[in-house]
Amino acid sequence: MKRIGILGGSSDQATADYYRRLNQAVNERLGGWNTAELIISSMNFGFCAARVRDGRWQELGAYLAERARALEGAGAEILLCVSNTLHRTAPIFTAGLAIPFLHIVDPTARAIRAQGLSRVALLGTKPVMATDFLSRRYAENFGVNTMAPTPEEQDLVDHIIFDELCRGRFTAESKAAYLEIVDRMRGRGAEGVILGCTEIPLLIAQDDRPGMPMFDTTGLHVEAAVDFALGSEPAA
């Protein structure tokens, strides 16, 4: 089993979900008492959030690069970042690494293409929805076109992420607000929706809208990481 290195802490809620899901996925494949081999570097989310808000991406990338190098030095054989938003700094924090980096867009886009879809809504933080660093990768590498919510909807989605989900608050009102946005995006032509913030799957899931394909970036990222970690090793 290869060792998975995790850039975590953005947020602690998402990081805990990754930890749980990675261990569960390995156990489901190998059975017995097997769990994943993981190394986690968990950052100060306050430092991270302030730099996202201020657009200090170079500073944030350098902060993550130090942690990525430490994970490689500790024996990680693949690197994950638990935040869609922080993938904006991936060219900085992966520079010079010898181990592979599993980009969160790639398994998500493959799942979208596998369902024959090409136009999907993208929910996430304001930087994810309002800029093109993720949508460009979806389009250029996989032919998947993403749709952003309206600016007002983006503000609401972002507010709920930072002020509620990242603090471990999950309310029925916020869930209903997210699902209303999903419904409106479907009315505008979205064939599915990317849950493009790793806290969002903690609030809404496919069962909430069975007729609208939801692409859980956390779950798809985890499955791809476990595929790599186990290689061709058969499940028990």
Image (cartoon, rainbow, N blue to C red):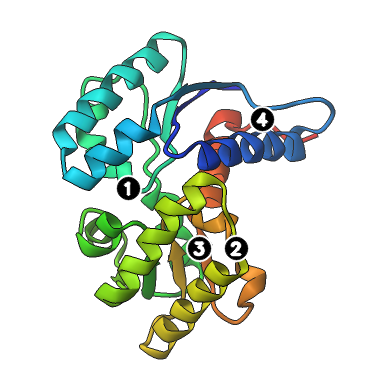
Residue position for label 2: 171
User: For residue 215, which numbered disc appears in the image?
Assistant: 3
Q: Residue at x 58, y 60 (%)?
A: 203
- Single out the mark in the foreground, 1 or 2: 2
Mark found first going from the N terminus, 1 or 4: 1
- Mark 2: which secondary structure? loop
User: For residue 85, which numbered disc appears in the image?
Assistant: 1
- Single out the mark in the foreground, 2 or 3: 2
- Mark 4: which secondary structure? loop
Q: Which amino acid is tagged 1?
A: Thr
Residue position for label 4: 233
Q: Which amino acid is tagged 2?
A: Thr
Instruction: List the single residue furthest toward the bottom.
Output: 187
Q: Residue at x 16, y 44 (%)?
A: 55
Mark found first going from the N terminus, 1 or 3: 1
In three-dimensional space, the C-alpha distance between marks 2 and 4, rounded to whole angstroms, equals 41 Å
Location of the C terminus (image quadrant): top right
Proximity of marks 1 and 2: CB atoms separated by less than 8 Å: no
Q: Which amino acid is tagged 3?
A: Phe
Mark found first going from the N terminus, 1 or 2: 1
Q: Residue at x 45, y 25 (%)?
A: 42
Left or right side of 66 for 44: right
Q: Residue at x 71, y 27 (%)?
A: 35
Q: Which amino acid is tagged 4?
A: Glu
Proximity of marks 2 and 4: CB atoms separated by less than 8 Å: no
Q: Residue 101 appears at what percent x and percent y?
A: 36, 33
User: For residue 20, which numbered disc appears in the image?
Assistant: none
